[in-house]
Amino acid sequence: MKKHNFNPGPAILPKEVLENTAKAVIDLDNSGLSIMEISHRSKEFENILNETVELFKELLNIPSGYHVLFLGGGAHTQFYMVPHNFLNTKAAYLETGEWAQRAIKEAQKYGEVNIVASSKDKNFTYIPKGWTIPTDVDYFHITTNNTIFGTELRYDIESPVPLVADMSSDFCSRPIDVSKYSLIYAGAQKNVGPAGVTIIIIKEDFLNSKQVQNRVMPLMLDYKVHVKNNSLFNTPPVINIYVVNQTLKWLKSIGGVAEIEKINLEKAKILYEYLDNSKMFVGTVVKEDRSIMNVCFVMRPEYKEKEEAFLEFAKQKGIVGIKGHRSVGGFRASLYNALPLESVKYLIQVMDEFERNNK
Ligand SMILES: *Cc1c(COP(=O)(O)O)cnc(C)c1O
């Protein structure tokens, strides 16, 4: 049976990306060698790496003066690598969910953290409003999409201090104005590839002028070392970068981030519309802050005991990955770039069928 993959991450990848990767695992471009068997310093791999950087620059319209890096360790490594490099005395963070909280906890090991605003009071079901960014901080950190709770900051904010963003779960889902950011990081496994590589877009000027001096700086933690070595200081996650390369080629082939945003908006729109009209299911997030990547919903109180039965029903219908995170419960449908509109329509049909059968 065809599977409809709503996994929150690692998540669905385009079929042609999987097919091309399968080929490259056996024989990379008729070289007689696997992508896993070649040197990261070979011409073949350097071409792939440089092409991937160029694809990001093109797709996200990255201005000059920025570097694109591929590092290991996931977004969790960025949670401490950012303050290690840039938190001199104080930083500001927006507390919008569990990933933001983890970033905050790591930053607190380096200095004072000013939590500018938080939506913890209502289990992160909204994005805080009306806050001001302090000007006496080294940087301001945001999480653009809150994967677990289903809220999203779908615009580029203006910041008087260097802006740092964890974009792991909405990276490349919409056009962004990179010039507003000093550092963007994203684990690949939500929208642009497999787990194991993190993409960092860093502003040269920020790195040169704001990196903390007088701190013990292991080479692997130093962004300057990675910039200088074009992500080849140590052995980078070679095959993961290959998959990112293929995913970006796919994205480009369908029209880039502006085009994928239209499709993403349509996917989210039809699912939220269904939820708003359903008597059984209900979304958990305030309307204006709804994520177009992760749609969180539960059953209304009078149907609550049917949640398990729906999960089982959906599973039998080939729907994968819709169980909600334990801190929200219910369900979460992740509608990342590679998930086709057709799968969202199918999910709605299955929800509707269940609703009609269980009135
Ligand atoms: C998934 C996710 C993370 C965690 O990423 P790892 O690669 O597992 O470290 C961090 N932030 C956000 C927004 C995420 O969606």
Image (tube, rainbow, N blue to C red):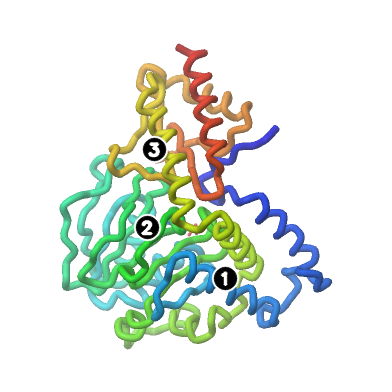
Q: Which numbered disc flags the more N-terminal residue, 3 or 1?
A: 1
Taking the spot 56% from the left edge, 36% from the top edge, the residue there is 342
Distance between the alpha carbons at the discs numbered 3 and 1: 36 Å
The answer to whether mark 2 is within 8 Å of ligand 1 is: yes
In this rendering, the answer to whether 259 lies above or below 36 is: above
Taking the spot 25% from the left edge, 47% from the top edge, the residue there is 119
Q: Nearer the viewer, mark 3 or mark 1?
A: 1
Which secondary structure lies at badge 2?
helix
Quickly name the residue at label 1. Answer: 52
Q: In the rendering, at what x and y percent does residue 175 appear?
A: 40, 59
Q: Nearer the viewer, mark 2 or mark 1?
A: 1
Q: Amino acid at mark 3?
A: Val
What is the number of the mark on residue 328? 3
Taking the spot 81% from the left edge, 70% from the top edge, the residue there is 30
Q: Amino acid at mark 2?
A: Arg
Residue 109 in view in this figure: no
In this rendering, the answer to whether 194 lies above or below 294 is: below
Direction from residue 219 to residue 151 in the image, left or right: left
Which secondary structure lies at badge 3?
loop
What is the number of the mark on residue 108? none
In this rendering, the answer to whether 189 lies above or below 8 is: below
Distance between the alpha carbons at the discs numbered 2 and 3: 17 Å
What is the number of the mark on residue 102? 2
Given the current orientation, which residue lies at the most extreme right position?
32
